[in-house]
Amino acid sequence: MYDFAVVGVGPPGARFARRAAERGYDVVAFERGEIGKPLACSGHVSLDVWEYVPESARERLHQNDVYGARFHTGGPGSDAHEFYYTDRPVSNAVDRVELDKALAEAAEDAGAAVHDGHTVTAVREKSGYVELDVRSSGGDETVAARMVAGCDGPRSRVRSELDLPEPEEFLHGVLAFDPEPDHDEFVDVHLTVPGFFAWRIPRGEAGVEYGLAATPTESGDVAARFDEFVAEYGVDERIEHRCSGLIPVGPPDSVTSTRAFLLGDAAGMTKPFTGGGILYGMTAADVAAETVHPEDPTTLPTFEDAWRDELGRDIALGKLIRKGYDAPRLVQETGMRLFEGEIGVHMDKPSTLFSAEQMKALFKR
């Protein structure tokens, strides 16, 4: 009988496994394939990510420093509005696969039993514990734990098995890579996609990441839109390692059941204005480790309140920012001209739009 079974060893699952193990709990974690693969998430992260990564892993993960973003209302070559830091990077490009591996290794070092190549095929809540059916190359087994953490992505098995509600919506995202080195210090954001945007992220010697996400019901063939996007940049013949997937946006009213809780993409814990969920998922994982007691299901409502207190304001503000993506072009251009230049905003926290640092940056102009 484990204290916690963790399903999915992406950043939220690995982080929760680590923090729970550090608190002395007996933790087992299952990843259905190889940790970090297949890649289905951008490697553009805020500097806060380094607070979660062991110091020894930082050099192998870091790819490029990013100081700002160029926002376009048109395609490649169109006029851009620049938003930037002057004295330090605003973000980093990192090796996304190696990030997952480093976080999983940290969980193992803390004492969690981490198993890749193990697929959870069923989850059953019992009186006082949870049963999981697990399939691997070594055969099938049933594992028991007092609590289960569903960290298994947009198509969460834990969520569906326990009839927990889905996130508010799912975007369809596509990304791929150009291997040509690029040390540019700015990312490019193109507000040319219904419901969302397209992007270009320089990754130093690792090349360039191109991506696009859109609301499937509004955008038609998302893959075709992506093909057009990279063709406009003139890199369509160099693109490799193409991948796609769902991006959940908007957490449901509940992410807990009797003896289960969801984290990360499974719970829709993502930034509504970018779709990124690495920091939000790991933040919620820390909250879960601090609040959930495996032998006391009454701690789950405490977790529900605590993680929403931590992330709810930024999620709500992020939804408002996203509405601007579909505003008339004149409105977009006017708004960006008003605020372009040096900024003091944290890329994961829209609430910092009202921070002293942002006000200082505005008044310096």
Image (cartoon, grey):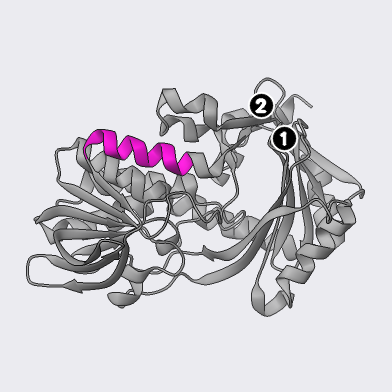
Q: In this view, does 279 lie to the left or right of 148?
A: right
| Along the viewing direction, whichever of 242 and 347 lies nearer the viewer | 242
For the question of whether residue 310 can be seen, the reply is no
**Residue topped by disc 2:** 360
Residue 144, compared with residue 123, is above or below; it is above
Give the crowd class for mark 1: few <14, some 14-19, many >=20 residues within 10 Å. many
Task: State yes or no: discs 1 and 2 in contact (Cβ < 8 Å).
Answer: no
Total marks drawn? Answer: 2
Q: Is residue 220 left or right of residue 148?
A: right
Q: Position of residue 248 (x, y in %)?
A: 51, 65
Q: Give the range drawn in magenta.
A: 99-111
Give the crowd class for mark 2: few <14, some 14-19, many >=20 residues within 10 Å. few
Q: Is residue 102 magenta?
A: yes
Q: Type of residue at label 2?
A: Lys
Q: In this view, does 222 lie to the left or right of 90?
A: right
Q: Is the magenta stretch mostly helix, strand or loop?
A: helix
Q: In which quarter of the image is the C terminus?
A: top right
**Residue topped by disc 1:** 68
Q: Position of residue 44 (x, y in %)?
A: 61, 42
Residue 91, compared with residue 9, is above or below; it is above
Per the model, the C-alpha gap separating discs 1 and 2 is: 17 Å
Q: Type of residue at label 1?
A: Gly
Secondary element at image label 2:
helix
Q: Position of residue 50 (x, y in %)?
A: 47, 30
Q: Quadrant of residue 160?
A: bottom left
Q: Residue at x 37, y 51 (%)?
A: 9
Mark 1 against mark 2, which lies toward the viewer?
Answer: 1
Q: In which quarter of the image is residue 171?
A: bottom right
Q: In which quarter of the image is the N terminus?
A: bottom left
Secondary element at image label 1:
strand
Q: Earlier in the sequence, mark 1 or mark 2?
A: 1
